[in-house]
Image (cartoon, rainbow, N blue to C red):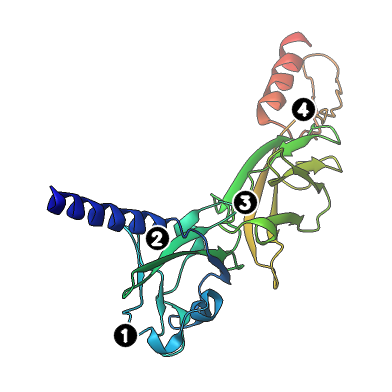
Amino acid sequence: CCCWFRVAAEMFGLLFFVLMAHTAYGDVSYSFPEEMKSGSVIGNIAKDLGLDVNRLSSRKARIDAEGNRKRYCDINLNTGELTVAEKIDREGLCGKKALCVIKQDLVLESPLELHRFILNTEDINDNSPQFTENVVKFEIQESADKGSRYLLDEAHDADIGLNSVQTYTLQNNEHFILNVLTRENGRKYGELVLNKELDREKQKEVTLILTAVDGGTPPRSGTVAIHITVLDANDNAPIFTHNCSTHNSEIITIIQNDYNTILLYYIIIYIIIYFI
């Protein structure tokens, strides 16, 4: 019974120690930008935890990633510094999350110690705004009223915060201006606003360049072409003269000045011949 009790007590003590070791959560945290080169120094964890640098090697200090978690940093046993194991792509790791937190453990032996620390990976402006299409097409009647609005697709940026899309600019032109709006989630998008009426007889097509710009330093941008086809409206009346001669002969002179459709021209000819 005594042996059993002694073994049980030792197991309980070991379990208690391990549990206590695992409660050392978030002792220290470090923030650093993504895409740092392998070997770059993040911070000195030995100094921050008050550990003896000279004993790191003998105590087999190491970075542990529990389960399937990846090891994102190493410890230099000579200096106690944490270094980047390999470049971290924040967008690939955390997507559009506001915070990109990585939890890692520092393990030491003799005696066993476990210190959990947090790596906060900060976003850098390493992505440019992109549109889903290279060309956006519109068909607009030339009779469209001034002030008519046409919704534009928003650009997408893998970065977050100020490094995401902040505004749009439109190529200077005669007919359209750009109105930039903000959605409830803070994302920006634009509208084309007709500022001067179109005239198909003068210009059948309009091509503009829309640019999305982020707020990084330096800023990055992406562009899309806007191709507008001006559709015809029946806004020109035909002009003709009708001269009649005597007896059996009749001379019809038509001066055609209708650019809208050839069909209308033939209808008018038919009416003149049939009814006059």
* Marker disc for residue 58: 1
* Marker disc for residue 119: none
Location of mark 4 (residue): 234
**Tag nearer the camera, 3 or 2:** 2
Number of other residues with Cα within 10 Å of mark 2, as a class: few under 14, some 14 to 19, many 20 or more: some
Label 3: element kind: loop
Q: Disc 4 to disc 2, how far (Cα)? A: 83 Å
Location of mark 2 (residue): 21
Q: Amino acid at mark 4?
A: Asn
Which is more N-terminal, label 2 or label 3?
A: 2
Residue 159 locus on image (x, y percent) = 59, 59
Residue 51 locus on image (x, y percent) = 47, 79
Q: Residue at x 80, y 24 (%)?
A: 251
Q: Residue at x 65, y 57 (%)?
A: 164
The answer to whether residue 176 is left or right of residue 265 is right
Label 4: element kind: loop
Q: Amino acid at mark 2?
A: Ala
Q: Disc 2 to disc 1, how far (Cα)? A: 19 Å
Location of mark 3 (residue): 155
Number of other residues with Cα within 10 Å of mark 3, as a class: few under 14, some 14 to 19, many 20 or more: many
**Tag nearer the camera, 4 or 1:** 1
Q: Disc 3 to disc 2, how far (Cα)? A: 48 Å
Label 1: element kind: loop
Residue 192 locus on image (x, y percent) = 76, 43
Residue closer to the observer: 170 or 111: 111
Q: Amino acid at mark 1?
A: Ser
Q: Amino acid at mark 3?
A: Ala
Q: Residue at x 55, y 66 (%)?
A: 29
